[in-house]
Image (cartoon, helix red, strand yellow):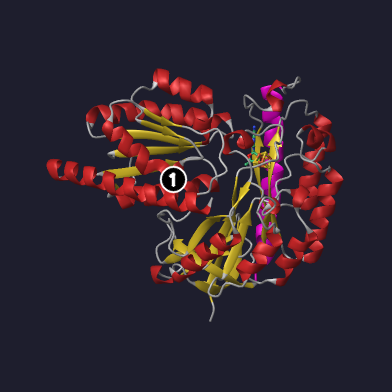
Amino acid sequence: MEQLITNETKQQYVYMDKCREIIKKKAELRKKPFTANIKTFGCQMNARDSEKLEGILENIGYEIVDSEDADFVLYNTCTVRENANLKVYGRLGHLKKEKEKNPDMMIALCGCMMQEETVVEKIKESYRFVDIIFGTHNIYKLAQLLYERFQTEEMVIDLLKDTDKIVEDLPSDRKYSFKAGVNIMYGCNNFCSYCIVPYVRGRERSRKPEDIINEIKALVEDGVVEVMLLGQNVNSYGKNLSTPMTFAQLLKEITEIEGLERIRFMTSHPKDLSDELIEVMKSSPKICNHLHLPMQSGSSRVLKEMNRHYTKEGYLALVDKLKQSIPNLALTTDIIVGFPGETEEDFLDTLDVVKQVEFDNAYTFIYSKRTGTPAATMENQVPEDVVKERFNRLLAEVQKIAAKKTGSLTGKVETVLVEEKNSHEEGFVTGRLSNNSLVHFKGDSSLIGTIQTVALDEAKGFYYIGHMVD
Ligand code: 5AD
Ligand code: SF4
């Protein structure tokens, strides 16, 4: 396996060289550099994949630009809810016009949506101008696919149903110099009945701890102070390694990396959250005071239908334990409204948990039917108007609580990581607290990427206004 991975990486660098030659010649001929633009839809996993894709394009010699008026436009797609798919089709119509104006332009599609056969069929039929299609398991092959496209007039399609391969050591272009996402595992084995992710991202595969640690050490050398460990269900990390290890053990090792200041992770499945993890979180100040713990529904009956493997009481007990063990822990969650068969009573259970837990923030979603998932064929799909009405009630409650919670640190002094210049107010910067809240305070761009101590003077809805203290 080791040998295979190394060879694969080497091979991809050869394709990058080949593409670089082609692009260079073309650019000289037309006396203009080649530009590329990646548009990312969906979650943090996709955002991280896009950094890798951008790294490959940069290595080839493309200049990365912000606009879609570019020579290579790549959509990294999401399919978790139908809306995400509709957005892609809408934008493709616009891209077609751009391509008619620029004979050098190439359009590529990758990511979760491409793992669905019906989507690829539709693109082959109705969007013939697309040049390259690939999926979630072969993003490391971008240079190879681009090279193939240069050799043919045909659409290049490369899709794998699943993979057990993890290709390491390819280039990557980070969005921020001071913080970075790090994949610790890929795929998901949970098959929540509404969710398409296990079908498009494949089975769970954990990266080796030494590869993760080495990547983080290299990031720290390069100026990174905060990492976000990424996986669909980080709490089941390490189960399929040749020497199994738990997520808590990995986390502990990561806390020992010198120079690394902050560690975040997502997503945690409540069914797998161990006492060992709570202990590690409690004992390391480097681990941020924030946990994203999707509850999806507050009704035990619905949770069973969702295949979530916990009950309302189980979730509440877990939250209780977390709050007791880690004071001031910020909790966020995901909630789906309108799962098939959800009754008013079920929904009231969801509202009840929201009120009891007092989430710092909750991402609320209207249930979206995904073809191929068990929930799609369930009877009693809830009528749209009923779902909308429930969704609005939930949102109002969530927002009321979130605003109240944001105020809870007013008057306190906290460390923050300065992330950017404030776009609304000249002379201000924006920093992130350990609990993931934002604070705006006076300062200039030289502070970006540093950790500062800030007094939180005032809470304004969902953020604080503060000032730096020495
Ligand atoms: N409909 C609505 N929301 C969904 N999610 C996943 N699948 C669906 C679906 N079919 C939500 C879940 C998950 C988040 C990333 O997206 O809440 O935690
Ligand atoms: Fe989807 Fe459930 Fe896996 Fe999360 S844990 S990706 S909701 S199947």
Name which residue type carries label 1. Answer: Tyr
Vertical side of 328 occupied by 368: above or below: above
Image position, residue 465 (x, y; %) = 55, 65
Image position, residue 124 (x, y; %) = 41, 21
Image position, residue 247 (x, y; %) = 68, 58
- On the rendered structure, is 318 left or right of 195? right
Q: Residue at x 54, y 78 (%)?
A: 469
Q: Residue at x 38, y 34 (%)?
A: 108
Q: Which residue is mark 1?
A: 140
The stretch in magenta equals 383-411
Q: Residue at x 56, y 64 (%)?
A: 213
- On the rendered structure, is 114 left or right of 12? right
Vertical side of 62 occupied by 299: above or below: above
Q: Residue at x 65, y 64 (%)?
A: 251
Give whichever of 342, 37 is nearer the camera: 37
Whether the magenta-drawn stretch holds residue 406 is answered as yes
Question: Is residue 289 at all visible to an observer of this figure?
Answer: no
> Cβ of disc 1 within 8 Å of ligand 2?
no
Vertical side of 267 occupied by 289: above or below: below
Q: Quadrant of ligand 1?
A: top right
Give whichever of 299, 184 is nearer the camera: 184
